Amino acid sequence: MIPLHELLGIKEENFCDYKVHFATGSNDKKEPYNAFLIGEFQEWQECQTNKNFGRDYILSLIYYDKDIWMFGGVYKVLPVPPIPIERDTGWKGWKYETELTDKASDYIGRAFFRFKKEFRASYPVLELVPKNGEPIAKMPLSHILDKRVALTDFLGFDQVNIDHKTLKRIVSDNIISWKSALSNVKGIYLIVDTLTGKQYVGSAYGDECIWQRWANYAKDGHGGNVELKELLKFNGEEYKYNFKYSILEVCNMNLGNEYIISRETHWKEVLLTRRFGLNKN
């Protein structure tokens, strides 16, 4: 298999110019991947908890699946000191200025590497040789897609696991693959508060399909649900960006309301969302 540095065209004598960023979210590992899909990865990466980017270039590897990392590009760290930033949530960090280079740009969102990361550091130097495992620079290529991953790719109901920003973009852009799939099924869905882990089970029945229900969530975060309204009222409207959406079960549009409601009840009981989650009934 082709190693990382060879595919990207980085010579060994230049390893010292690079830091590798194993990009994962703190509450949701696929947060940077979702940011990539909506074109916000660079902005996401530039906000750091500490002064992590101490070399000329950042080689970005985005968490995709267990031991699989997607190439997110090589970024030049501009000669501008990072500035301290603070968000409304109380998060404090540093804002860098970077520039996406054209190095191996054809492989961005297409090349995937296999690497079992057994150390804690998310920003190792490219020449690092871990105590366990192969050198970072020589991690093997897993596969290359024919085309770059994109938000327009609806991969199936069992693969849906998106955050609020992604849902909002899907709905606002009226992405056909998603709209077509979600407009032709009723079903049971799950909303998770990624800060607390609490879950909300909901359903789409009657004249509504999942697309209509989720379009309402994309608009205001609560979709008219009393429990979620209360949560947003207490924590503020921006709290909706902590929500993630997935589908538990899809149902034929011809199935009656009673059946779908019974399936919703089943999932509430399985996941204990009345006792430990966000469902009240």
Image (cartoon, rainbow, N blue to C red):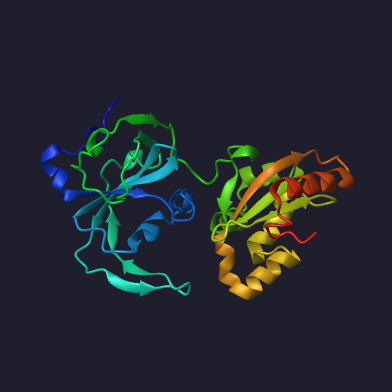
Image quadrant where residue 94 sits: bottom left
List x then y, in percent, for residue 165: 54, 58
The quadrant of the picture occupied by the N terminus is top left
Q: Residue at x 34, y 64 (%)?
A: 49
Q: Relative to 111, does residue 212 appear above or below in the rendering?
A: below
- Residue found at the very far front of the displayed protein: 275
Between 30 and 76, the one lying in front of the other is 30
Q: Residue at x 25, y 44 (%)?
A: 103
Between 178 and 92, the one lying in front of the other is 92
Judged left or right of residue 191, residue 76 is left
Between 18 and 98, the one lying in front of the other is 18
List x then y, in percent, for residue 263: 80, 44
Judged left or right of residue 131, residue 27 is right
Q: Relative to 140, does residue 86 appear above or below in the rendering?
A: below
Q: Report how many numbered discs are placed on residues in the image.
A: 0
Judged left or right of residue 263, residue 53 is left
Q: Is residue 197 visible?
A: yes
Judged left or right of residue 195, residue 96 is left
The quadrant of the picture occupied by the C terminus is bottom right
- Residue found at the very far left of the displayed protein: 13
Q: Residue at x 46, y 54 (%)?
A: 35
List x then y, in percent, for residue 208: 80, 52
Q: Is residue 236 visible?
A: no
List x then y, in percent, for residue 140: 30, 30
Q: Residue at x 77, y 61 (%)?
A: 280
